[in-house]
Image (cartoon, rainbow, N blue to C red):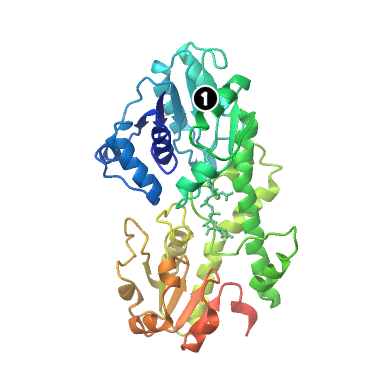
Amino acid sequence: MKVSVIGLGYVGFPTAVLFANAGHEVLGVDINENLISNINNRMHAIEDEQINLLYNEVVESNRFKADTKVCGADVYIIAVPTPVRSKQIDLSYVISACKAIVPVLKTGDLVIVESTVSPGTTEGVVKEQLEVSGLKSGIDFYLAHIPERVQPGNIYNELVNNDRTIGGIEERSSNVAIDLYSCFVKGKLIKTDAKTAETSKVMENTFRDVNIAIANEFMIICEKIGVNPWEAIQIANLHPRINILKPGPGVGGHCIPVDPWFLIEQDYEESLLLQSARSRNDKMPLKVTNDIVEILQENRGRKVSLLGCTYKANSSDDRETPTERIVEYLKERGIIFSAHDPHLKQQWDCTTASLKSCLSDSDLITLIVPHKEYLQMKPQELSLMTECRVIFDCTNSLDTSLWEDCGFTIITLGLRARGI
Ligand code: SAJ
């Protein structure tokens, strides 16, 4: 079949590669001309070796091409961003994708929405936009929502092995979509309706946001009452039905801090817990900043070095990253700082390419993102780069006794106010 994947980002690109690898003729579409030219010239790469390998094969064998325009196909997969701006969901990229499909849509085609959308969007706005073609959904063409569930860095494995929710606007749309996705998905293909699929997708990430918020709140309360939150959470998690996630410097990325808004906007008055979890997690960069300022004052220090700028360990993705907020707060307070991240694709104004220059004249090292490069470093190696011996560990990732035996003071998030 001819498959057109609209939006060649974190999800669209690997999805296009897997459809091509399964034998379909794939046209990837994106508004970014640079990206299109890189993809066609085999100069594109993502953080997943398996996908990169298959991508080279499918471009070479002419099964995958990219363009800025949507052309006629049998299947259209919409994988464009749905950003949240000022707590409002921006559907404009999804609507543009629908408008681009309308002139080429024909009887028997299948349209899939993979982008995360609010409950009711596929059967509402998407269907309405596509029916401008004069064709009727569920009769002339098929329509389904199939949310993605991939973790950056583990995309091939998760695209192939995770279960997928298949939410057709009616039974036949679900069945046609199941036939299509079974060409590369080894996980279960779970049939439901479009609105349930949309709801369960945003529920998944909202659950994670609320769980991280409770971990952060437990940490703050434990710190106040002089209990080690990391130990208390570890013990609580020994209960067979408890799984509290980890406290940290905040929640970043393009999914967990964004998706709760798709549910909150359905009912502002009643979504009290979800709004509260959002605000708990959003306040974490401020808590880290306050801790940094206090630790500097206690140590009569002036400069802090921030290690880790991306939204999570071993990823190059810096969207919605807590470090960016910490940087803003430090600037507002007039604190001297520099930052470093070996995974960033593009340096920030405040980052240095070398760790040594980031650490120069530092009075406090704050480990925000526990990238493997930092965790693999031995205390002796760090000692050679800096005279600073105080580390603030925001994710409890360092082996405290190992570092303290080598002359460092380790202050762990949540343990600062314990007075020990
Ligand atoms: N975080 C914590 N404490 C934890 C776990 C995570 O503070 O215990 C922070 C991370 O540091 C990061 C943020 O939360 O800043 C989000 O990281 P994540 O690993 O929880 O999630 P994402 O955004 O990388 O991917 C999520 C995944 N969803 C779930 O696990 C329910 C992924 O499967 C989804 O495909 C993805 O969102 C998405 O695209 O929706």
16 sits left or right of 167 in the view? left
User: Which residue occupies the foreground of this view, 141 or 263?
Assistant: 141
Quadrant of the image containing the C terminus: bottom right
The residue that appears at 56% across and 13% down in the rendered structure is 139
Q: Is mark 1 within 8 Å of ligand 1?
A: no
User: Which residue occupies the foreground of this view, 332 or 338?
Assistant: 338
Mark 1 residue element: helix
Q: Is residue 375 visible?
A: yes
User: Which residue occupies the foreground of this view, 55 or 229?
Assistant: 55
Instruction: Name which residue type carries label 1.
Output: Val
290 sits left or right of 263 in the view? left
The residue that appears at 45% across and 72% down in the rendered structure is 375
Quadrant of residue 219 within the rendered picture? bottom right
Crowding at dot 1, Cα within 10 Å, few <14 / some 14-19 / many 20+, comes out as: many
What is the x, y in percent for residue 12? 42, 38
Q: Is residue 335 visible?
A: no
Q: Which residue is mark 1?
A: 126
Above or below 272: residue 139: above
Above or below 387: residue 163: above
What is the x, y in percent for residue 137? 55, 16
The residue that appears at 45% across and 85% down in the rendered structure is 300
What is the x, y in percent for residue 48? 40, 50
Quadrant of the image containing the N terminus: top left
312 sits left or right of 383 in the view? right
Quadrant of residue 194 within the rendered picture? top right
